[in-house]
Amino acid sequence: MLRVTLAAFILSTVMLFAVPNSALANSASADSASSNEPGWLGVVVARGELKKWIDSTPIVDRPNRPFHFYGNAVRREYYRGSAAPRPSDLLKGGAALVTKRK
């Protein structure tokens, strides 16, 4: 339990310092694309109403989710022109998984 709490604390601390810096570094090339790009959803396996909503939404409009490599790559290619993840994507995905934020 302590390891999980410590890992969540370290990840959230890294998010505070790393995401703004990487966002500033990438802002010149990604301002127009990332403004329309969907955010992160911390649910890996969707159930119930959320699953129905996700299934009825086009793949490029769905939120990014941890471990959903194909869908996330399709959205990155659509919005950015490159399927390769940025370091900030890894941090945001990890933070969404730990905190289960929408």
Image: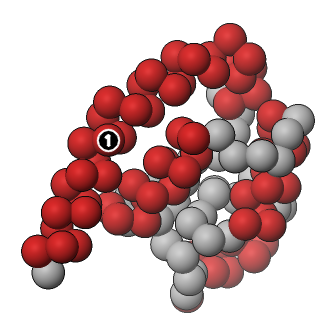
Q: In which quarter of the view is residue 17 placed?
A: top left
For the C terminus, the quadrant is bottom left
Task: Name the colour scheme.
Answer: secondary structure
Q: Residue furthest top?
A: 28
The answer, for residue 60, to whether it is visible in the render is no
Image vertical order of residue 42 relative to residue 60, above or below: below
**Where residue 78 sits: x, y (%)?**
87, 43
Q: For the residue marked with disc 1, what is the amino acid?
A: Val
Image vertical order of residue 43 relative to residue 16, above or below: below
Image vertical order of residue 41 relative to residue 30, above or below: below
Drawn side of residue 5 relative to residue 20, left or right: left
So how many labels did they put on this image? 1
Q: Residues within 10 Å of mark 1 (few under 14, many from 20)?
A: few
Drawn side of residue 19 relative to residue 54, left or right: left
Q: Residue at x 17, y 63 (%)?
A: 6
Q: Residue furthest left?
A: 2
The answer, for residue 95, to whether it is visible in the render is yes
For the N terminus, the quadrant is bottom left
Q: Residue at x 75, y 76 (%)?
A: 55
Q: In which quarter of the view is residue 49 placed?
A: bottom right
**Where residue 18 sits: x, y (%)?**
40, 32
Image vertical order of residue 17 relative to residue 59, above or below: above
Q: Residue furthest bottom?
A: 48
Q: Residue at x 16, y 67 (%)?
A: 5
**Where residue 47 sits: x, y (%)?**
55, 87
Q: In which quarter of the view is residue 80 placed?
A: top right
Which residue, given by chain and number where applicable, does mark 1 sit on? 14
Q: Residue at x 68, y 70 (%)?
A: 68
SS state under label 1: helix
